[in-house]
Amino acid sequence: MAVGTVFMVLYLLVELAVSDSSKSSEDVRCKCICPPYRNLTGHIYNKNVSQKDCNCLHVVEPMPVPGRDVEAYCLLCECKYEERSTTTIKVTIIIYLTVVGALLVYMAFLMIVDPLIRKQDSYIQPLHNEEDTERLFCPGSLLAGGVGRMGPVGVQSPASDTRPFAPSHAQARANTVLERVEGAQQRWKRQVQEQRKTVFDRHKMLS
Amino acid sequence: LLKMLGKCMSILSTVFTTKHPADSLVEMAKDQFYRRGSFNSYQSNTSDEDMVEIADAPLDFSLADDVPPLDREPQEGYTNHNGAGMNGASKIMDFLDEPIPGLGTYEDFNTIDWVREKSRDRDRHREITSKSKESLWALIKGLSDAFSGWLVMLLVGLMAGAIAGLIDMASHWMTDLKEGVCLVGFWYNHEHCCWTSDETTFEQRDKCPQWKSWSELFLDQSEGAGAYILNYFIYVSWALAFAFLAVSLVRVFAPYACGSGIPEIKTILSGFIIRGYLGKWTLIIKTVTLVLAVSSGLSLGKEGPLVHVACCCGNIVCHLCAKYRKNEAKRREVLSAAAAAGVSVAFGAPIGGVLFSLEEVSYYFPLKTLWRSFFAALVAAFTLRSINPFGNSRLVLFYVEFHSPWHLLELVPFILLGIFGGLWGAFFIRANIAWCRRRKTTKLGKYPVLEVLVVTAITGIIAFPNDYTKMSTSGLISELFNDCGLLDSSQLCDYINDVNSTKNIDDLPDRAAGKGVYMAMWQLALALLFKIFITIFTFGMKVPSGLFIPSMAVGAIAGRLLGVGMEQLAYYHHDWIIFRGWCSPGADCITPGLYAMVGAAACLGGVTRMTVSLVVIMFELTGGLEYIVPLMAAAMTSKWVSDAIGREGIYEAHIRLNGYPFLEAKEEFTHRTLAMDVMRPRRNDPPLTSLTQDGMKVEDVETIINETTYSGFPVIVSKESQRLVGFVLRRDLIISIENGRQRQDGIVSTSLIYFTEHPPVQLPNNPAALKLRSVLDLSPFTVTDHTPMEIVVDIFRKLGLRQCLVTHNGRLLGIITKKDILKHIAQMANQDPDSIMFN
């Protein structure tokens, strides 16, 4: 959760920094819209000038009317100074597309790959646990029992034959981290399942 | 500006006086509570606070005599006699001695007890204050605790603003993606693609060579039947793809992210717990899918969901800070302020956001929350402004600025628009609720994905041929609000200009409508019909969907139609008696854009029944103070009309449809029933399950817990006397017994449980007894069995109670919970009482 907040704040800082620092040439414009005048049609002038120069006299070039009419013509025109940040736009759209892409990949993972893994898992899981308890309680029988059982499944690395203790520790730690992640994911999935039942199946909420 | 502020303040003060009784009642209750504490004088320094608080609450003196005679009993007798010494000090000590994790938390779909939460916060606060006098470190900690509220608000504002900016930009881009793509950079939307282009012309100002429509890209032609069909096809395909993506993301990752969210936020703020509703997954998915839903062209807006998104931010930020993480009531204060920040960024109306939170969503809104909301709204608006999502230095797309005056006689069409808005609001609520009920109960609800796809397909197919439905809804509103000048070349502004006119550009006279305007009128009329009907089926689908923008669009179209009609009427018949004098030829007397704005306000008011916040939001949108009266007239009329037809706004209607336990503060309870008619147990039921303060064994209590499903039990002195001691929550009881069994030595099934101050006398070879005084609520609210229900309902509403015990002659008789009250109200209104589903 904190990570999310930090990320948001970072995003914000990037946005602010970007919008302040990089005023590239295509980030400012002075746009003058001149309505039809006498026999002239309406016209739009677009120029890259600073804010103080943003008026009809500087932007409308070439002037379509003779000198004495310039004032009248320019009175009709409306000039607006506008700023934008192309980097912000780019960054935002790319961030958004990345998030959508990540969610799509994760969705595909949850719907297609995950069930396959689960199916395998249901074979591995009980053996794994048994092995763990054996390791804990009777270290003497570890090698024979552990490897023998793991053999057919083919998960154990060959290194554990020679150095039984170091890898088992490493594996145990990796296991706990993995398990924690796994556990959190399972908890979250159960919650979503529950929510889906409430909203989509039982129609108790939000309908 | 001063005038505006003055108006705001007077509005505020009126609103506050209506909400204030709740506050003062709470204060009163607290005073009662703490005064007894100081009476027993365990802590002398609390009495200072008490004096201040008493002085603040004048009502309290009148109650002083009503304080039960218990207070006047001798002190020792009081504390020893039934152990009900109600002192905050001992409570604090107990909490400090054994902080048990999970204690004082609630289960999913439960109602919180505001009184308990607030008293816990005060205990905590008092503890910090007393500690801060001891050391510098504690002082700093105390200061940081006081400051953390503002820090949380700052973070909420920053997050809400940033997310709103992201949503604005992304949805703008994706909406345009349905029509074409920018060649100089795919991330530019249509407007930004042509931003620096010199090739835009006055007539076709959105055309530039950098932006390619799909037909130009694939067929290399921009006109003709083939190009049209290809564009049509791609438009609908994108819409379907976006909608499908949105609904499947919602379904897979966060089902709570669908809908508008405001009914649920209202319920949560009134003290209900929905776990996961404001979580981080909901936040991510709602943000992502909101963009998809908006850009799929469905008739929905992003404003309501933004409130939900901001509340998610509030909830997430609350987790950073223990003060808010652990206290549900405090957290709701943050959420109220977050809702304000949400509206602030949705409409670019910070003050309107604060008022919206106050008028529409919040349940408990003290002054402190007002200031915090103000700050959060300010930060959020500032953040959004610095991101500048639209590139026009405005916070919303449909910002308008016009200053043409209005005539008094124009109030008549404004009121007509108000009536239209009211009628539409009432019709929409009826139709939408009927449709949603259908979805809830029939087979329709079984196919949410298909439903979304069908509605999107219909929307896309009908919308594409009509220019005014093809564009994004906020773009449409922006065009309708716009006042036609010489600079505009759109179809809607195709007026016949007087070539010889030498008038200044700013005050154009009323002009005769050209062909384009008539054409636009037809298209707008069709768009109006389309929007009216499609919105009914769209709102409530399983994608994030807001209601503000579609209803504003309906109102704006109707208003613009009426405005143009009035304008032409005045132009051709300026000699009529009603136009004579103020609408002479060559005068600029009618502004169709203003009518569109008033219509939008009226329709929004008819649907949501907002008044004050609506008007403030509208004038913040327009920056024109002179239109307050027309907006007020329209908002008021529409509220009257729609209230006359159906009593509840769309959010209340959805709350009732879903059966959320929400005690409406706006409605009066007028039936003449008594507490004894509502309380449980009923006449023929078995007596109330209660615990005795000593003499029960652990196994007895566990049996009671296992056999019943009640979420709390009253504690009495003994079965014979039935005199009340306090109230203990089921969850707390379970947790503490489990904790006692694990941590404390000698706690077995035969151990005694006692709620008294001192352990009961027992034989030496008996197992150790378990003291549970710390989880006992010593100050449960009680009423007598003859209390009228009006008063009981009022107490529940204003104090935010969860349950209330009923006594008769001082003996415990029964219990009334919030659910009982809601069921009773439903029954009295001839509705099905079982529709209230949750506790």
Image (cartoon, helix red, strand yellow):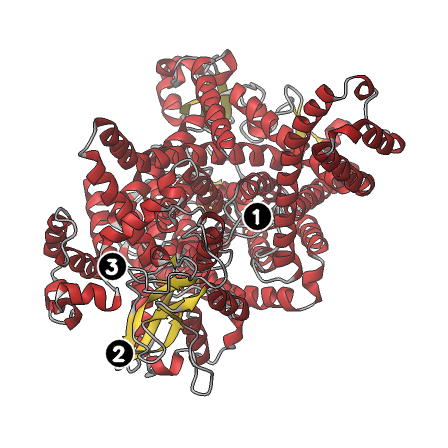
Q: Are marks 1 and 3 on the same chain?
A: yes
Residue at the (57%, 50%) spot, across then down: B256
Kindly identify the residue that appears in the image at 41 percent across and 61 percent down: B765
Residue occupying the far right of the picture: A152
Q: Count of labels shown?
A: 3
Residue B254 in view in this figure:
yes
- Foreground: disc 2 or disc 1: 2
Mark whose residue sits in front, 2 or 3: 2
Q: Chain of mark 2?
A: B
Query: Horizontally, is B200 left or right of B8 in the view?
Result: right
**For the residue labelled by badge 2, is the local secondary structure a helix, a strand or a loop?**
loop
Q: Is residue B281 above or below residue A23?
A: below
Which image quarter holds the C terminus of chain A? Answer: bottom right
Circle on res. B26: 3
Asked if badges 2 and 3 are on one and the same chain, I answer yes
Residue marked by disc 2: B810
Q: Which residue is mark 1?
A: B257
